[in-house]
Image (spheres, helix red, strand yellow):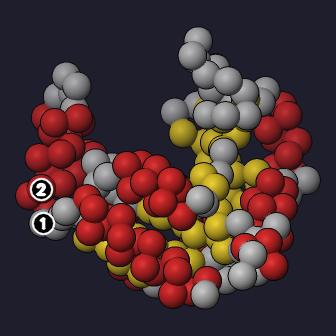
């Protein structure tokens, strides 16, 4: 059956920092010929970034105008910059029969769930808390002990929210298995 004759799916993938969400999402997108949603932001564009590929780069005034117009499925202000998922490209892709992946934090995931209740909510978990701590410390890049502890506390809070509000859970112990588990979840619901 041609994918465009099927209804697409919106898949929200969340998990704590360091759990491997980005790697899993990239591989799922490749293997399923899915689409990874492009977020909008007010942060400055990096030299190697292209508008519409990594992000849609907007001025703060334009971002706020779009918030007021209801143009985002979810948004947040992080370290003085807005980030959000534009609603229209996601709706168009799903209507065209595509699987659209949103890699977002749990707060954004809950906003999407409230606006798009049929979205598949997948939460990525570490195999054990110690593994997540090791990954956080490996990514710390010069952070002090307190900053690492704050990251771990945030990760624990995200896991608690995920367990309470998400429908599907994948443990990222072996990457290929975790990717296949996410694909299996998506395909069972799209067939």
Q: Residue placed farthest to the top in the image?
A: 47
Q: Which residue is mark 1?
A: 128
When the figure is inspected, residue 89 is found, relative to residue 146, above or below; the finding is: below
Question: Which is nearer the eye, 109 or 68?
Answer: 109
* SS class, disc 2: helix
Which residue corresponds to the image point at 14% horizontal and 62% vertical from the top-left? 129
From the viewer's perspective, is 96 left or right of 173? right
When the figure is inspected, residue 70 is found, relative to residue 8, above or below; the finding is: above
Around disc 1, counting alpha carbons within 10 Å, would you say few (fewer than 14), some (14 to 19), or many (20 or more)?
Answer: few
Which residue corresponds to the image point at 57% horizontal and 16% vertical from the top-left? 48
Which disc number belongs to residue 108?
none
* SS class, disc 1: loop
Q: Which residue is mark 2?
A: 131
Around disc 2, counting alpha carbons within 10 Å, would you say few (fewer than 14), some (14 to 19), or many (20 or more)?
Answer: some
Quarter location, residue 131: bottom left
State the quadrant of the C terminus: bottom right
When the figure is inspected, residue 145 is found, relative to residue 15, above or below; the finding is: above
Question: Which is nearer the eye, 70 or 25?
Answer: 25
Which residue corresponds to the image point at 58% horizontal and 69% vertical from the top-left? 11
Q: Position of residue 87 (x, y in %)?
A: 79, 58
Between the residue at mark 2 and the residue at mark 1, the CA separation in whole angstroms equals: 5 Å
């Amino acid at each position: 059956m041609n994918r465009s004759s099927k209804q697409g799916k919106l898949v929200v993938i969340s998990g704590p920092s360091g759990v491997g969400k980005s790697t899993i999402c990239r591989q799922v997108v490749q293997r399923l010929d899915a689409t990874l949603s492009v977020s909008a932001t007010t942060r400055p564009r990096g030299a190697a970034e292209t508008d519409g590929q990594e992000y849609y780069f907007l001025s703060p005034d334009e971002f706020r105008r779009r918030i007021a117009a209801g143009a985002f499925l979810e948004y947040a202000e992080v370290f003085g910059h807005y980030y959000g998922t534009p609603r229209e490209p996601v709706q168009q892709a799903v209507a065209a029969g595509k699987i659209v992946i949103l890699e977002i934090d749990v707060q954004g995931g809950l906003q999407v769930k409230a606006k798009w209740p049929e979205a598949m909510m997948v939460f990525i978990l570490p195999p054990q808390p110690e593994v997540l701590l090791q990954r956080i410390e490996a990514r710390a890049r010069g952070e002090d002990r307190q900053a690492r502890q704050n990251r771990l506390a945030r990760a624990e809070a995200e896991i608690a929210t995920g367990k309470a509000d998400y429908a599907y859970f994948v443990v990222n112990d072996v990457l290929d298995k975790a990717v296949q588990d996410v694909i299996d979840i998506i395909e069972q619901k799209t067939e």
